Amino acid sequence: MSAKNVDKHNRFRSITVGFRVSPEENEELNRAVALSGLPKQEYCYRKCMGREVVVQPNSRVYKALKNQLAAILMELERIAAGDCVAEELLRTIGLIAATMNGIKGDNADD
């Protein structure tokens, strides 16, 4: 038998909640989860409950930031060729900016 899944208040999480998303929404959700550094379940739980998602800088977060910034660079190069800016790109840039501002704020205390 596997270990019980409890939260930090020792509450047993025994109920499964699921929802459907489009492939585009799934990609956006996966990007947000990667940038948060949290497991997907915890990220979704916090967002659904209206709780703050605090990014704890670690190697996974930095790798996700690096990958997203590389993807944004490719997209910006495409835009420079004359194409229009996708709304999804603007949301991703906003999410990265918020993440970086949060990390910068954490490091300012050092």
Image (cartoon, helix red, strand yellow):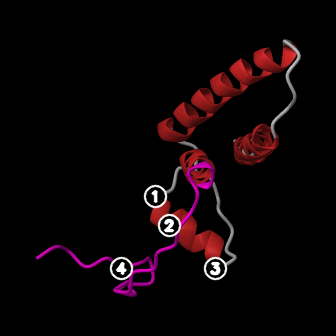
Disc 4 designates what residue? 6
Disc 3 designates what residue? 49
Disc 2 designates what residue? 42
Q: Position of residue 101 (x, y in %)?
A: 78, 44
Determine the main secondary structure of the stretch shown in magenta: loop
**Residue 99 or residue 29, whichever sits in front:** 29
Labelled disc at residue 39: 1
Question: What is the secondary structure assignment of the residue under circle 3?
Answer: loop
Q: Which residues are magenta?
A: 1-25
Q: Position of residue 63 (x, y in %)?
A: 53, 32
Question: What is the secondary structure assignment of the residue under circle 4?
Answer: loop
- Mark 1, Cα crowd under 10 Å, few <14 / some 14-19 / many 20+, is few
- Image point 73% across, 42% down: which residue? 92
Give the CA distance from mark 2 to mark 1.
5 Å
**Residue 98 or residue 29, whichever sits in front:** 29
- Mark 2, Cα crowd under 10 Å, few <14 / some 14-19 / many 20+, is few
* Magenta stretch: includes residue 13: yes
Q: Amino acid at mark 2?
A: Glu
Give the CA distance from mark 3 to mark 2.
11 Å
Q: Amino acid at mark 3?
A: Met
Mark earlier in primary sequence (3, 2): 2
Q: Amino acid at mark 1?
A: Pro
Describe residue 5's horizontal placement relative to residue 77 as left or right. left
Mark earlier in primary sequence (1, 3): 1
